[in-house]
C-alpha cells in the first residue's frame, strides 16, 4: 500500500455538513479518570485514534479492564489504588504526549518502577517540565536526559506542593493535578492560561478542586485523596480536527460547511477568534452546556476579503495546535500578519514552526522570521502551478493534513507522504474530506 497521497486538482464548490471525531484531549482524560474511579464508567463517542487506543491498552496493562459495546467504551475502575503496579512494567505511549505526561501523575503511588516509552517523535520531546514538579511530591523519577524513557517509582509518603506553571501547558498542569488527587493535603497551583478540560471533568465528578481565574493565570487548589464513582460521558467533536475543514472552506470558492456538535471550550477556540479578526465569518450556533464544556455547531463559508492580523500573544495557547492552518490563511490574506512568541510550536510532534516557515517559502510566500516571531506577507492571488512533494516532516499528522488543505485550495500537483500519520489523532480525515468532493489518490 502506498505511504503517500496524490492531489492534482483543487476541490470544487461544496455545501455540506459533517461530524468530526471525538475530542482527543477529552478522550484521553476520560480514559485515565475512568481508570481511577470506583465502579463502571461509560464513555461514548471516544476518539478511536492510535493515541487513545494506546491509552486504553496501557490502563489494561495496569490492571483496568474495558470493553466496547457499539459506540460505548465501558471501563471498570477500582479507585486511586486500583492500578496493579506490584511488578515492573513498560507502558507504551506511542505518539501521545498527553497520555505519557498525564499518566505519570497517576503513577505517583506506584508500588514498583514503571517505565514510560514512546515512539521516535515523542522520544524527542522534553519531559523535564513534568518530571521536575512530580519529584517535589516525593516520587523517584529518572529520564534519558529529560527525554523518554522515563522511569517512575511511587511512594506511600506523598506530600502536597506549590507549583508555578509558566509555559501555558495543559499537560504539565494536568499531570500535577492528577498527582495532587492522590496526595493528602492541599496542593496549590498557579498556571498560565491553557485548556482546562481536566478541571472541568474534576468539577463534574464532584472532586474538591477550587479555581480562581485571573487575566493571565489560573489559581487552582486540589484537596487530595477523595475517591469518586464511575461516570458517563459523551465526548464532543474535536475543534483541532475541525480546523482543517474550517480553513478548507474559507479558502475554497463559493463553499459552505456546517460542522456539528464540536467542543468550543474557550481555551480551545483561538483559531475562530483569529480567523474572524481576519474577516472570516465563522458562526457558532446551537450552543449547549454539557458537563461544563460548551458545544456548538460551527457554520463557515468561503471568505473573499481576508486581511492580515497582528495576532495577540494571549491567543497563542488557545490556538497552539491550529497555527499551521492559520498560517495558510495568512498566506492568502491581504496585508501582513504578525505572530509572536511561538517557540512552543517547535516542542510539538515535530518542529512545527521551522517546518511552517520552510513550507511557506516553498510555496512562494514572503516570510520574515526573527527567532520565534514571524511576519507573513499575504498574497490573495497566491496559486501553485508546479509539483510539490511533502516528506521528511517527522510523520507529524498536522503537517500532513495542512498539506492536503493547501493542495486542495492552492492548486499544483502534490505528493504528500506519511498518510498513516493521521491515525494518531484523526483516522477519518481522508474519508471525510473525500465526501466533500476532494479527489485524492
Image (cartoon, rainbow, N blue to C red):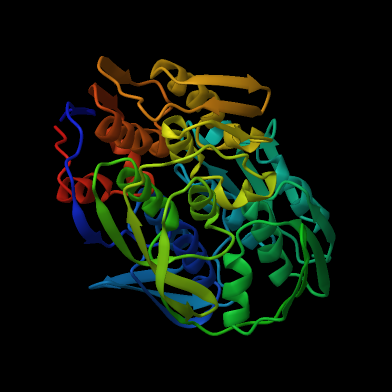
Residue 105 seen in the figure? yes
In the rendered view, tell whether residue 11 sits above or below residue 279. above
Q: Nearer the viewer, residue 225 or 90?
A: 225
Question: Residue 376: x percent and y percent?
Answer: 54, 27
Q: Give the number of marks.
A: 0
Q: Nearer the viewer, residue 241 or 143?
A: 241
Res. 406 image quadrant:
top left
Res. 22 image quadrant:
bottom left
Q: Residue at x 23, y 73 (%)?
A: 70
Residue 182 seen in the figure? no
Instruction: Pick the quarter of the image with the C terminus.
Output: top left
For this orientation, the residue located farthest to the front is 305
Q: Residue at x 46, y 17 (%)?
A: 361
14 with respect to 165 (left or right): left
219 with respect to 367 (left or right): right
Instruction: Pick the quarter of the image with the N terminus.
Output: top left
Question: Residue 232: x percent and y percent?
Answer: 43, 81
Question: Residue 230: x percent and y percent?
Answer: 49, 82
Q: Residue at x 16, y 35 (%)?
A: 440
217 with respect to 23 (left or right): right
338 with respect to 389 (left or right): right
Question: Residue 174: x percent and y percent?
Answer: 65, 60
Q: Residue at x 62, y 46 (%)?
A: 316
Q: Nearer the viewer, residue 235 or 232?
A: 235
Q: Nearer the viewer, residue 414 or 308?
A: 308
In the rendered view, tell whether residue 72 sits above or below residue 150. below
Amino acid at each position: 500500500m502506498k505511504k503517500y497521497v496524490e492531489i492534482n486538482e483543487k476541490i470544487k464548490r461544496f455545501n455540506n455538513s459533517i461530524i468530526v471525531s471525538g475530542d482527543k484531549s477529552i478522550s484521553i482524560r476520560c480514559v485515565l479518570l475512568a481508570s481511577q474511579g470506583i465502579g463502571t464508567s461509560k464513555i461514548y463517542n471516544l476518539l478511536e485514534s492510535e493515541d487513545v487506543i494506546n491509552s486504553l491498552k496501557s490502563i489494561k496493562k495496569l490492571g483496568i479492564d474495558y470493553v466496547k459495546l457499539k459506540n460505548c467504551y465501558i471501563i471498570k475502575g477500582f479507585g486511586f489504588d486500583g492500578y496493579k503496579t506490584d511488578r515492573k512494567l513498560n507502558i507504551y505511549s506511542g505518539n501521545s504526549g498527553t497520555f505519557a505526561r498525564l499518566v505519570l501523575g497517576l503513577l505517583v503511588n506506584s508500588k514498583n518502577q514503571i517505565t514510560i516509552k514512546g515512539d521516535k517523535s515523542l522520544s524527542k520531546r522534553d519531559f523535564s517540565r513534568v518530571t521536575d514538579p512530580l519529584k517535589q511530591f516525593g516520587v523517584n523519577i529518572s529520564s534519558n536526559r529529560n527525554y523518554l524513557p522515563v522511569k517512575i517509582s511511587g511512594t506511600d509518603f506523598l506530600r502536597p506542593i506549590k507549583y508555578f506553571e509558566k509555559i501555558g501547558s495543559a499537560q504539565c498542569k494536568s499531570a500535577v493535578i492528577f498527582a495532587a488527587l492522590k496526595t493528602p493535603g492541599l496542593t496549590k497551583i498557579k498556571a498560565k492560561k491553557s485548556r482546562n478540560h481536566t478541571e472541568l471533568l474534576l468539577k463534574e465528578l464532584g472532586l474538591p478542586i477550587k479555581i480562581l481565574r485571573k487575566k493571565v493565570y489560573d489559581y487552582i487548589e486540589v484537596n487530595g485523596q477523595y475517591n469518586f464513582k464511575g461516570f458517563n460521558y459523551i465526548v464532543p467533536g474535536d475543534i483541532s480536527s475541525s480546523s482543517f475543514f474550517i480553513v478548507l472552506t474559507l479558502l475554497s470558492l463559493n463553499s459552505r460547511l456546517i460542522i456539528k456538535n464540536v467542543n468550543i471550550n474557550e481555551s480551545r477556540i483561538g483559531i475562530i477568534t483569529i480567523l474572524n479578526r481576519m474577516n472570516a465569518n465563522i458562526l457558532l450556533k446551537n450552543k449547549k452546556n454539557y458537563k461544563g464544556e460548551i458545544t456548538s455547531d460551527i457554520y463557515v463559508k468561503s471568505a473573499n476579503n481576508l486581511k492580515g492580523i497582528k495576532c495577540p500573544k494571549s491567543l497563542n495557547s488557545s490556538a497552539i495546535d491550529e497555527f499551521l492552518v492559520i498560517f495558510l490563511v495568512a498566506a492568502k490574506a491581504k496585508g501582513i500578519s504578525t505572530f509572536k512568541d511561538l517557540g512552543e510550536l517547535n516542542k510539538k510532534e515535530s518542529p512545527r514552526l521551522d517546518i511552517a516557515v520552510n513550507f511557506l517559502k516553498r510555496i512562494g510566500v514572503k516570510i520574515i522570521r526573527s527567532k520565534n516571531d514571524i511576519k507573513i506577507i499575504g498574497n490573495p492571488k497566491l496559486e501553485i502551478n508546479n509539483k510539490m512533494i511533502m516528506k521528511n516532516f517527522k510523520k507529524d499528522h498536522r503537517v500532513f493534513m495542512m498539506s492536503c488543505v493547501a493542495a486542495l485550495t492552492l492548486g499544483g500537483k502534490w505528493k504528500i507522504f506519511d498518510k498513516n500519520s493521521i491515525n494518531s489523532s484523526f483516522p477519518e480525515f481522508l474519508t471525510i474530506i473525500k465526501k466533500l468532493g476532494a479527489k485524492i489518490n
